[in-house]
Structure formats: structure tokens, C-alpha cells
Amino acid sequence: MCQRLTYEEFVQKLRKWIIKDAHLPEDYVFLKKKEKTGITANGDRLFVVCAETDSGKDICGIFVEELYQDYVEGTSMENIEARVKCDLDRAGNMENTRYLNDYEKVREHLFLGLLNLEKHRHELKNAVYKTMGDIAITLYVHAGTLKNGITYLKVRSEYLETWGLEKDDVLHDALLNSYRILSPRIYDFKKMMYTPGYAGDDFMNVDPYFISDKKKKEGICLSVKGLTNGAVAVLYPEVIKKLVELMDGDFYVVFSSVHEALIHSSKLCSLEELENLLRTSNSRMTFQKEFLTDKVYYYCREKDKFIMLQGSLKMLVTTIRMDEEN
């Protein structure tokens, strides 16, 4: 059994690996120890010079104390190196992150994504997010463009202090951005399978007349254009209003992945059958990183809130009554 590296050994090993893997000069990767104030106030960082331009150097900071904690808790060096490599690959295409200290410049590039709170607890330690049941509503910044799409990063909590803003205000701005960037779409499963080029339909223009009781029971698939990070669409205020209209009241949400949400009428479905549906969906999931939750959620129009259900409708009623008492 291999002996665990000390913190200093871990940092040096990681530094040497970065230099070798990225083919960088020795002085392009350097450690800055934690200070009481300033850029390293939140932890030791390995700084990596990723690119040089006429205006200066693009530098990526890697929080090594957090990585070492993951290593101590059982994450292999190979996995840590893979995570660092992913971050460095993105770093050369992060034109928006250089403006992170200036909220007015970065504001339009902020958006929200949903993550499972427990499975992502390590990477959420210093991120900006708020919870909804077992889901973390997480703040991201669209960092730049890659050959195969966009690159994005979680926003660290210290930026709230830099901006002088409250978390809820920033998350609200990001929610409005998400609606603009990730426009809501409704998808038909048969068309997805058999119609080449099918990209869903404009959700906000769906006529309630065409949503039959059968479809309300079977569920409608809500996502966004491109079917990536689409589960967040269920949080858009205008989408919630539209769903209440389509479902004629309260509704269930089955998050089959981070990419979509299945919406079911609360009047036509039982919680038990939806839990079975979610269990089946999660068991067939190809990539565990797409997993969001094993709980069914319920939107209560009267409370204007999403409630995580714990296994019986009785629990839901009890939760609502306790809220009313408080």
C-alpha cells in the first residue's frame, strides 16, 4: 500500500506534473502561500501561466489545499491530475474570466446550473449556490468558447465580497440571464428518436389546448435549446406560470438528469409511480455526472415553492402544514 503524500510532497508532485504535461518552463508554475488579505487570502494556489499576449499573461490559479483534502479523503492522484488538466485546457479560452472582479462587465455572462448537493459537495465548498432540497442551484460564468462548445466555471464565493453584492441578488441576475441564454423548450420523445434535426418546440408558445390529459399524466419534457443544463428551466418564473397553466394547477417535477425535467399533473399522477419512473431513469443513466436527484419534487402554487418529497404524499401535506404553522 502506497504511503500518503504530505501536503508539501503533494504540491510539489502536482507542480512537476503540470510542468511536464503542459510542456511549460519551470518558472511558469509557482506556488503562492495563503495570505491574510489579497488574492491568496482564501488558500494556497499554484499559479500557472497559460498564455502570453501583448496585454500581459493569462494566469490560472489552482487551489491546492482543496485538492489535497480530496486526496486525503481518497481521491487518486490520477483523478486529481485529470481535473487539473481539464481546468488548464479551459484556461486558454477564458476571455470572460479576466473581468470577474468587475461585476458590470461579467454580469451578462453569469448563469445558473443544478447539481446534486451531496455528490458535488467537495467542488461546492467555496462556490456560490443556494439549496432546494438535495439540489444546489449553482452560479456559473460563461468563460469562453472552445472548438466543441463553450467553457464555463463555478463562481467562487469570495467574488460576492469583491462585488459588494448579496448572494440572492446575484443569483437573481443569473436566473434572468439563464432565461435569455438557455431558452426553454419542450421536447417530444418520438420526434427526438425519429425526426432528424428536431430541436424541440418553443415552450412559451405552447397552446394548453394541445396538452391532453394523457400527456399531463405521462409527463412533458422540459429543457432548453441544445438539451444541455436544461433542468434549470423549471426555475424560470415565466416557465412556472406557464406550467401552472398547462397542468391546471400544482405539478410534480421528475428531474431525470441535469439536462431535463419531466413535468406531471398533480391531479393525474401518484407519487409512487413517479418515484418508480425516476428510479428506472436513474438506473439507466449512462453518465453519473448527469445525475441530479433521486427525489421527486412538487410545485405548490399557493406557497410558490418547490418541495422535495420524501416518499409519501402524507409527508408533503405535513411539510405544508408545518410551514403554515411557522
Image (spheres, helix red, strand yellow):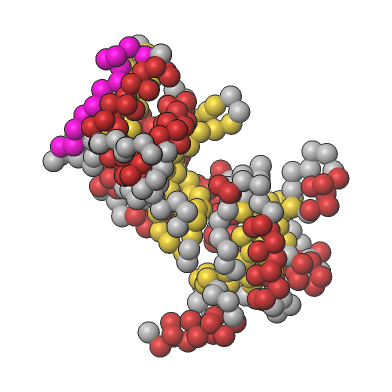
Point out residue 138 in the picture as x, y percentages from the top left corner: 44, 51
The relative height of residue 145 versus residue 218 in the rendered view (above or below) is above
Quadrant in which residue 41 is drawn:
top left
Residue occupying the point 34% across, 50% down: 125
Q: Quadrant of the N terminus?
A: top left
Q: Is residue 184 left or right of residue 52?
A: right
Give, as a single range, the part of the protein colored magenta.
24-35
Camera-side residue of 97 and 120: 120
Q: Is residue 282 visible?
A: yes
Which residue sits furthest front? 1
Q: Is residue 230 visible?
A: no
Camera-side residue of 124 and 182: 124
Q: Is residue 242 left or right of residue 306?
A: right
Q: Quadrant of the C terminus?
A: bottom left
Q: Is residue 222 magenta?
A: no
Q: Is residue 34 magenta?
A: yes
The relative height of residue 41 versus residue 91 in the rendered view (above or below) is below
Point out residue 155 in the picture as x, y percentages from the top left corner: 38, 43
Camera-side residue of 58 and 46: 46
Residue occupying the point 26% across, 22% down: 30
Quadrant in which residue 70 is drawn:
top left
Point out residue 295 in the picture as x, y percentages from the top left corner: 57, 67
Residue occupying the point 43% across, 85% down: 322
